[in-house]
Amino acid sequence: MERTNSQLSCFQYLIAGPCAVESEEQVVETARRLWVQQTHFPIPLSFFRAGVWKPRSEADAFCGVGEKAFPWLQHISHDFGFQVCIEVANARHIELCAKYGIKAIWIGARTSVNPFIVQEIADAIHHSDFTVLVKNPIIPDVRLWLGNLERIEKAGIKKLLAVHRGFSDTTENIFRNAPMWDIPIALHLMRPDIPIICDPSHISGQRQYVKQLAQIAIDYGAMGLMIETHCNPCAALCDAAQQFTPEELSELLRSLTFKHSVSNTDDLLRQQRTLIHNIDHQLSQLLAKRFSIVKEIAHIKQEHDIPLLQPNQWNSVVQNYHQHTLQDDCYAKFLENFLDLLHHFSLEMQQNKKEL
């Protein structure tokens, strides 16, 4: 990919590496292949990311190899010239980073929910030369995210970045974490001086959605991407489904379109259009999923000789849609027509199934 200033004026950070350090062979091989591929990247690799400690939800899940990973990471930094970036969750982790010469760290989404721990980390790095990346907390709270950034900033850290990695969401969603693009946009409006990069790996949870999310992030004006990369994703001990090989990462980056600089007005308009584009992506996927469930319902009704028309169930569907209705006559008319269409084709699909 040819690198031009006009293309990359807003894109400044590229971070790649495995979700977790699993072995010396695994992490060094991943770094070696990233080093080979980076000539095809839009910009040189900014940081080699690697999880030394992994805060897992399950007690028996792989939680990282800990301190023994540091000599391997030193080897990578020396041999390939990569600046290594690792996740930290307490002051002891900071001490080990300083001991082994690691100067770039990130604070993860689970840690970011606790201001006490973030302050502990801030105190441990007070007036140091660390580069600190702060991921959004898993709960959708822009003030908490901003507060964490300000705690690190008040510790005298000059190199500070925000990382958008999505938010925990219990509603139906095609992604592992809900993007909630309005939250990073709000953060950018509050602190336009803090670069925001996107971690589409953790938003998506699956490789198939990473390109879509990465392009949306770039369209919104994200200043970089953090994408999980593993020499053998199928054998990864955690988050295997969302990791790319270095060669696949190179192909992915070549497929993205990087934006030119725009005026503030154009930028705001582009953000809103990109938001609509993202919503349309999810609507199309969710509608397809809905109709696949309708087909399953048709089979159940056919097997148990249940009538197609279920008024109480449909009234419940209508009520769900009206929970989030807008006070707008045009929208009310659209919603009425949309629900009529949805009901008509749901019944038609079930009728067709019954006739087979």
Image (spheres, helix red, strand yellow):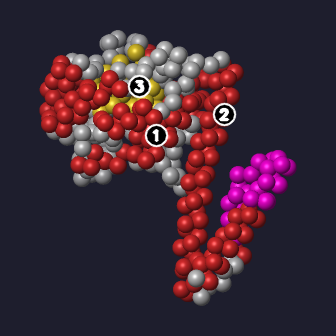
Q: For this rendering, which residue is in front, 88 or 185?
A: 185
Front tag of 1 and 2: 1
Give the amino acid at mark 2. Gln
In contact (CB < 8 Å): disc 1 and disc 3 = no
Q: Earlier in the sequence, mark 3 or mark 2?
A: 3
Q: Is residue 208 above or below residue 5?
A: below
Q: Secondary structure at mark 2?
A: helix
Give the amino acid at mark 3. Met
**Residue 272: which numbered mark, if any?**
2
Residue 304 in picture, x, y percent from top left: 56, 87
The residue that disc 3 covers is 1
Left or right of 219 on screen, residue 43: left
Q: Secondary structure at mark 3?
A: loop
Q: Is residue 163 above or below residue 300?
A: above
Identify the residue shown where x is 19% and y is 25%.
76
Q: Secondary structure at mark 1?
A: helix
Q: What range is drawn magenta here?
A: 314-338
Identify the residue shown where x is 40% and y is 15%.
159
Q: Tell me if residue 332 is in the magenta stretch.
A: yes
The residue that disc 1 covers is 211
